[in-house]
Image: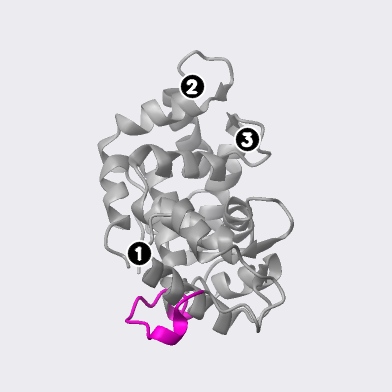
Amino acid sequence: MSVRWETEGLQTVGIVCLVIMFLKLMHLLGLIDITETDSSDSDLELSTVRHQPEGLDQLQAQTKFTRKELQSLYRGFKNECPSGLVDEETFKSIYSQFFPQGDATTYAHFLFNAFDMDRNGSIRFEDFVIGLSVLLRGSVTEKLNWAFNLYDINKDGYITKEEMLAIMKSIYDMMGRYTYPCVRDEAPSEHVDKFFQKMDRNRDGVVTIEEFIETCQKDENIMNSMQLFENVI
């Protein structure tokens, strides 16, 4: 496996593609398995988990999944996470298995925080399925909003160059020896400088959600990457 970082647009494309790895992880864990359900699974089963998710009707209204898809997703989630919650250390441990030649700890931390919507230190089934719905079936704007949230580490509504660099370094750290050619130490900073300059249109030192979305929508590589989410499940 090799990854070549060739264009400025690949900074954000890298984020998108790596989330696909997260989806593959969920598939291997049995969390994504959309199959026929029997009549006994007419609603979410809540008796074996400590955290009880929201009702099926409410989740169906909040997502773009069908009732049957939500039932299948919940069965997989319940089987792998009997407590109904995934904490950060478990998330890091599982995610790191995909990148044995690198260090995925920091990137997994950022990705975990993007899914942990209520900032309580764990991913609930609701967090997981709402985020998954955006990534798989949301509009381009919804997906870009999700990506912006990933970059906005301190959740203040702006992306700073330091935040973008932290995300980018975490990607390079995670890929490790999978990157080709070998990455120079200054490469992440150089890529961020170029892409941040393109995004920060009014030169105020931060990127707003409007600047982020406008720039991404004009980048062909990023727009093409949005299609990677289609038909995953």
Q: Earlier in the sequence, mark 2 or mark 1?
A: 1
**Gap between marks 3 and 2, in whole Å?**
13 Å
Q: Earlier in the sequence, mark 3 or mark 1?
A: 1
In the picture, which quadrant includes the N terminus? bottom left
Query: What's the magenta bit mostly, secondary-structure-wise?
Result: loop
Residue 172 image position (x, y, % from top left): 51, 54
Q: Residue at x 73, y 59 (%)?
A: 121
The amino acid type, in three-letter code, at marker 2 is Asp
Residue 57 image position (x, y, % from top left): 49, 61
Q: Which residues are magenta?
A: 28-43
Residue 78 image position (x, y, % from top left): 57, 79
Label 2 secondary element: loop
Quick one: label 2, few (<14), some, or many (20+) residues within 10 Å? some
The amino acid type, in three-letter code, at marker 1 is Ser
**Gap between marks 2 and 1, in whole Å?**
31 Å
Q: Residue at x 65, y 73 (%)?
A: 84
Q: Nearer the viewer, residue 42 or 194?
A: 42
Residue 34 shown in magenta: yes
In the picture, which quadrant includes the C terminus? bottom left
Q: Which residue is mark 3?
A: 162
Q: Which residue is mark 2?
A: 200
Q: Residue at x 51, y 43 (%)?
A: 188
